[in-house]
Image: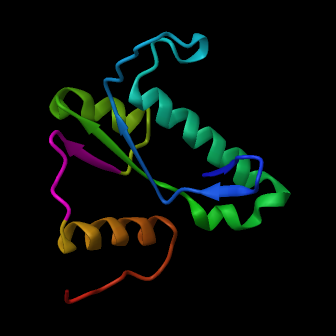
Amino acid sequence: IEVDLGRGCVNYDLIIVEERLQRTSPINEMEGMSGSDLLRVVNEMEASASSSSLSSSSRSRSSLKIGVSVSLEEDCESLRNKGSADVFWSKPPPKPSNGLRNQVMNALLSKRGKSIFICGC
């Protein structure tokens, strides 16, 4: 997804979203929004950007969306169907490691139609 912050567009490779969002103060259009709702909005933004003639490179810059939940068994269907998450993590999320990095990198490259990355690290 590309986001214009007034000083150029920023691309995000990974978007990690908790399904059961907690709000400290209600924001009108975000009130009652779940993580899968938020991912649906991100998907719509990506689709809009990829159809724009100004963003021809955004087709290959799709973000990898990771849905996270403390109750993944209950929330997986919503994250998959409603939010179109690519990867699912339960809480606590996996600890950073070379193996996790390689899995995330391969998922991202695969989503973008690129060659798979292999590292013996």
Direction right: furthest residue: 53
* 44 shown above or below 120: above
Say which residue appears at 40% left-offset and 14% top-offset: 24
Q: Quadrant of residue 91?
A: top left
Give 20 or 37, whichever is nearer the viewer.
20
Which region of the structure is painted magenta?
87-96
Look at the picture and state if 51 lies above or below 56: above
Report the number of numbered marks.
0
The picture places residue 57, in percent across and down from the top left corner, at 70, 67
The quadrant of the picture occupied by the C terminus is bottom left
Query: In which quadrant of the rendered view does residue 109 lie?
Result: bottom left
User: Residue at point 42% right, 65% down?
Assistant: 108
Closer to us: 97 or 115: 97
| Visual colour scheme | rainbow
The residue at the far front in this view is 7
Residue 38 in the image, given as x and y percentages of width and height: 49, 31
Residue 17 in magenta? no
Q: Is residue 76 above or below residue 113?
A: above
Front-lying residue, 6 or 2: 6
The residue most toward the bottom is 120
x and y percentages locating residue 9 in the rendered image: 71, 56
Q: Position of residue 30 (x, y in %)?
A: 54, 18
Magenta highlight on residue 93? yes
The residue located at (35%, 72%) in the rendering is 106
State left or right for residue 75 relative to residue 57.
left
- Left/right placement of residue 60 relative to residue 71 reads right
Residue plotted at (41% across, 31% down): 36
Most frequent secondary structure within the magenta stretch: loop
